[in-house]
Amino acid sequence: MSNPPLPMERYSVQPIGYIESDFPDKFGVPRQPGLAKAACASLVLVPPYDDPLAVRGLEAFSHLWLTFVFHQSPPRWTPLVRPPRLGGNAKVGVFASRSTHRPNRLGQSLVQLSAVDTRAGIRLVLAGCDLISGTPVLDIKPYLPWAESHPEARAGYAPEPPPQLAVRFSDEARAALAAREDAASLRELIRQVLAQDPRPAYRKGAEERVYGVRLRDVDVRFRSTDEDGAPVMEVVEIVTA
């Protein structure tokens, strides 16, 4: 005789804080954490979780796991998804992917902890973050490399990091950067984001079309060009968003 099905329980969760980051929109966000190391962010804890006692000892860890909600993804989900690493056409099961279109819209991100600021509430300063501003964070856990790093593990259809493309800046884009106090860090952020080719997978063959990606307070307009047979991401202009 088979066991009766378990009841479908429901669980109530609430954010412990929210992300403030260099990414105002989804488009252009690196598809995995750490791929754009110049991407800065903060996790600002909200009451009652903004108690300094809750983060005592956290500064001893260099990296953190964040559990968050893909709050800009639709609540619907499907059992099959199209990972960008497979060109946006081949399908795999949603649980064999890191798709944002998941049953509970939960995500995990491994981020670098740069500082713990307790002067006014709690602000965790992060680096290499792949989360957009406003992302609700549900939990924080310290990363333990001896338990969670397995270099010998198989990585399915994503066995290595995505290839990095060359990025070049037009004269107009360079002039716009030169006028900013954060010119060096913004230039590096743009380079790291565009090097991963943020265009939709099904558009990768189309050149000359100009795309726009929001980074910090600017709209970075770029296109793909061909240089000696290799694709190059060209920054056409940088304008205030």
Image: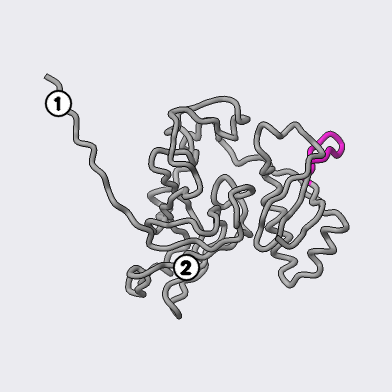
The residue under label 2 is which amino acid type?
Leu
Where does the magenta region start and end? 224-233
Q: Circle 2 is placed at which residue position? A: 124
- Relative depth, front residue between 156 and 196: 196
- Name the spot of residue 6 as percent of width and height, x first: 19, 33
Mark 1, mark 2: which one is toward the viewer? 1
Could you say whether the residue bearing mark 1 is in a helix, strand or loop? loop
Residue 207 appears left or right of 202? right
Using the image as rendered, state which of residue 123 and residue 64 is in the foreground: 123
User: Which residue position is annotated with label 1?
Assistant: 3
Residue 169: name its quadrant. Answer: bottom right
Q: Position of residue 92 (x, y in %)?
A: 49, 27
Asked if the stretch drawn in magenta spans residue 227, the answer is yes
Quick one: SS at disc 2? Answer: strand
Image quadrant occupied by the N terminus: top left
Where 216 sits versus 210, above or below? below
The kind of secondary structure the magenta stretch mainly shows is strand
Q: Image quadrant for the C terminus?
A: bottom right
Query: At 78% from the left edge and 44% from the top edge, which residue is drawn?
Result: 210
CA gap between label 1 and label 2 equals 46 Å
Amino acid identity at mark 1? Asn
**The magenta stretch spans residue 177:** no
Left or right of 194: which side holds 23?
left
Place of residue 119 in the rendered image (x, y in percent of width and height, measured from the top left): 45, 80
Q: Is residue 152 above or below residue 235?
A: above
The answer to which image quadrant residue 122 occupies is bottom left
